[in-house]
Amino acid sequence: SGYGKLNRILGGGYIKSGLHILAARPGTGKTTLALQIAENVAAKGIKTLFICLEMGVDQLQHRRLAMDAGVPLGDILTIGQEDTELWQKIYASTKKLSSRPIVFNRMPGLSLSRIERLARSSEAGFVVIDYLGLIQHSTGKSIYERVTETSNGLKRMAVSLGIPVLCLCQLNRGADGRQPQLSELRDSGAIEQDADSVMFLYRDEYYNENTEEKGVAECIVAKNRHGECGTVKLLWNPGKVTFSDEEEVK
């Protein structure tokens, strides 16, 4: 994952043939964390497929540049021709990022079968999907049945490809303002059953401006079929849209 303590809790990282869930309420930063994890994996030379069904590729590329260059996302979006120093940082980051084996989809509303074909054709060693609720489902079924079918299919895909699949998921409103629980995974209990690991991302300052945990995010491993459960604290920088390993900062 690129985060030391999280790797240790997971038993070394994301298990091959495993379905790994990262769930949170909207606005918490789960896409950002998933993108950083994908970058960390790709930086090790592992071909990575990032399926984003909610955000455009250009938006993702801006975030990648901000993360790597260590500059605020707003500066990337509003850069002027005269800002030579920032352009140099962007050029250096663009050159580095372009060498990483990471592929982004450019089509919205993909079905699970299409995602699997993309993973096979790109020879991906790691797949990230953002997010489960936007995967095209079969028609004529209830939401519960469609999500259950998709969850089962994600696990089968991970096993068939022999690679880790990290899928993002929404949480019910009941998770607002407190640490989430497994029962709050949206629309189907099959997600918890099929997953090898379930991680929640929670930032108390998103709900409580007087919190003592400012700039801190909790990555809570609530289910882990291959190891222990526990909580990892990450440092959140909203300007540069990055999560940092607390151990590395210290």
Image (cartoon, grey):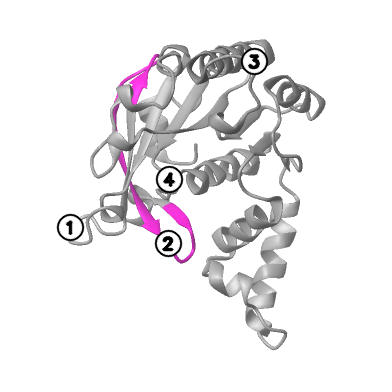
* Image location (x, y in percent) of residue 145: 52, 13
Neighbours of disc 2 within 10 Å: few (<14), some (14-19), many (20+)? few
In the rendered image, the vertical position of residue 50 relative to residue 15, given as above or below: below
In the rendered image, the vertical position of residue 91 relative to residue 217, given as above or below: below
- Kindly identify the residue that appears in the image at 67 percent across and 69 percent down: 90
Please name the residue that numbered disc 1 is placed on. 212
Residue 26 is tagged as 4
- Kindly identify the residue that appears in the image at 65 percent across and 38 percent down: 50
Closest to the observer, 44 or 122:
122
CA–CA distance between discs 2 and 4? 15 Å
Please name the residue that numbered disc 3 is placed on. 157
User: Which badge, 4 or 3, comes first in the chain's sequence?
Assistant: 4
Q: At label 4, which amino acid type do we have?
A: Pro
User: Which badge, 3 or 1, comes first in the chain's sequence?
Assistant: 3
Please name the residue that numbered disc 2 is placed on. 238
Tag 2–tag 3 contact (CB < 8 Å): no
CA–CA distance between discs 2 and 1? 17 Å
Q: At label 1, which amino acid type do we have?
A: Glu
Closest to the observer, 109 or 139:
139
- Residue 230 is inside the magenta segment: yes
Q: At label 2, which amino acid type do we have?
A: Pro
Q: In the structure shown, which secondary structural element does the residue marked by tag 1 occupy?
A: loop
Q: At label 3, which amino acid type do we have?
A: Met
- Residue 92 is inside the magenta segment: no
User: Which badge, 4 or 1, comes first in the chain's sequence?
Assistant: 4
Residue that sits furthest to the bottom in the current view: 82
Magenta segment range?
A: 222-243
Neighbours of disc 1 within 10 Å: few (<14), some (14-19), many (20+)? few
Neighbours of disc 4 within 10 Å: few (<14), some (14-19), many (20+)? some
Tag 4–tag 3 contact (CB < 8 Å): no
* Image location (x, y in percent) of residue 157: 64, 15
